[in-house]
Image (spheres, helix red, strand yellow):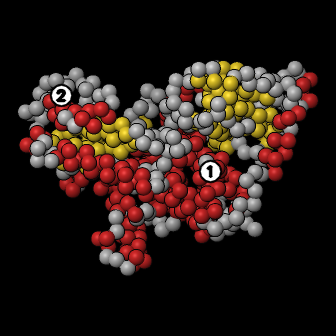
Amino acid sequence: MLTTTVSDYNKIYKSIAKNLDISNEQFEKAISHYEAVADWLTRESSPLRLNNPDIYVQGSFSLGTVIKPLSGEDEFDIDLVCKLDLHKTNTTQERVKNKVGDRLKANSDYNRMLLEESEICWTLEYQEDPKFFIDILPSINDETQWLQELAVPQRLAQTAICITDKDSFDYKIITRNWRKSNPKGYSSWFKEQMTAQFSRRLQLLAEHRSVSIDKIKEYEVKTPLQRVVQILKRHRDIMFGSDEHKPISIIITTLAAKAYANEDNIVDAIKNILLKMPSFIESVNGVTWVRNPINPSENFADQWENHPVKETNFRDWISKAKIDLVNIVGTKTVNDARILLGENLGNKIVNESYRNAGFDIISESSPALIRHKSIVSLAVHKETPKWTMRLENTIFVSARYKDGNSWYTVTPETILPKGKSVVFIARTNVKKPFDVFWQVVNTGEEAKNNGQLRGSIFKAQTAGAGGLRHSEDTAYTGTHWVECYVIKNNVCVARSNEIFVQIK
């Protein structure tokens, strides 16, 4: 039966997004740690009390768009701002940075947990499962007049701050030249984009629990905008893995919020957001801009000019996300959609989400995948790994190919013509350093007749993404596959699934 209703897909996407949330236990633990840090920095015995410290959360925790790591052994963090009541005309960035750092070091536990000082913040490492970090950003108040002159509303401009930057030329001297930021203003702006749906859901949840609205915690309410951002970030992670040039979250979040029209369901929201996001990308004197909504003089895409691959990757990602997340609605059976969504959002998350949404999973593997796997044992020319195998970690490989201006995911059902370039991207929870090896196995008479029955294991040839990216061109009719191995100290600690490529 075809899934032709928005309702079915909305259930699926809602369940997927919910499964992308970190657990309530992790969330509460993060809040507990954050509150403990805030208490230490602000308590009466703290020297910072003279400067009226204001501690608050920024980033995805503040926006309600945090997603769980790709694997349980990965890490996540929470970003805090520590704003001191000081003015840049009577202090230096170094003094402000050290005021906060000295207070953290005065706590024996925090002193032990402090990592090497970064250019703008202090980082505490919590040895938990998953590993957890708190970044504390020292800052002071900024003036607001310059923002109001740029037509930023007073309610958003008034929370602007100046932050410390150890790499700044002016770090140790009194100057008006500080880095500027406004995470509280950005959070307010983001939430204003979804006010109608947030208020509606807040009221419904309160009524469902038979409690007053003030008894509902903000993070318990999720709007379609927040859910779409979560799904888009996971789709990005699957598509690009650890590629340093992948689309950054602040650009995804900003364009999604600008495009959101308070749709009341995820399917309509994700469709309209992906359709409209490019319209909010500007060109200013030949330079591509994604304008910061609460500081119009800041370009979130400022790296695109010097690194054009970043813009190319972003536009390719938009194109592929439309195909993977929008075009499947109403055109695939429930099970076929599951297979495609699993390739693009993660099989474990998608399978669990289907079950939670009440949809039966007909088969964990497609008929095509079952057929492909049946030929693996027949490839006697395939090299056998020589390493000791201790597969204590995970690695997952996905593949995509470009047709025209659009990128498509390679699935077991995909049949490719010759002359296409296929990009394989691996994601692993193995901690660096490690070595990456790939194995490409060809089958079929055409490859055999041309002496191309490849099957050897070779070290990654490219430095991009730490060797976790590999490209091949389609050349010979048949069913071929690729595997990836992660090696530490001459031991294979992770081995991927086979990614099959059918060539016609």
Q: Viewed as shown, does residue 286 lie left or right of 80? A: right
Q: Viewed as shown, does residue 154 lie left or right of 362? A: left
- Identify whether 363 is placed above or below 85: below
Q: Position of residue 436 (x, y in %)?
A: 62, 25
> What mark, if any, has residue 94 been given in the picture?
2
Tell me the element at label 2. Answer: helix
Q: Residue at x 73, y 66 (%)?
A: 2
**Amino acid at dot 2:** Glu
Asked if the residues shown at circle 1 and circle 2 are in contact, with their CB atoms under 8 angstroms apart, the answer is no
> What mark, if any, has residue 266 been given in the picture?
none
Q: Disc 1 to disc 2, how far (Cα)? A: 46 Å
Q: Residue at x 29, y 71 (%)?
A: 214
Whether residue 245 appears in this view of the structure is yes
**Residue 406 lies in what quarter of the image?**
top right
**Residue 165 lies in what quarter of the image?**
top left
Tell me the element at label 1. Answer: helix
Q: Nearer the viewer, residue 252 or 368?
A: 368
Q: Position of residue 378 (x, y in %)?
A: 88, 33
The residue where tag 1 is placed is: 348
Query: Where's the N terminus, which quadrant?
Result: bottom right
Mark 1 Cα shell of 10 Å, populated few (<14), some (14-19), many (≥20): few
Q: Nearer the viewer, residue 388 or 362?
A: 388
Q: Residue at x 38, y 66 (%)?
A: 198
Query: Where's the C terminus, which quadrant?
Result: top right
Mark 2 Cα shell of 10 Å, populated few (<14), some (14-19), many (≥20): some
Q: Position of residue 273 (x, y in %)?
A: 50, 55
**Amino acid at dot 1:** Lys
**Residue 213 lies in what quarter of the image?**
bottom left
Q: Position of residue 334 (x, y in %)?
A: 70, 62
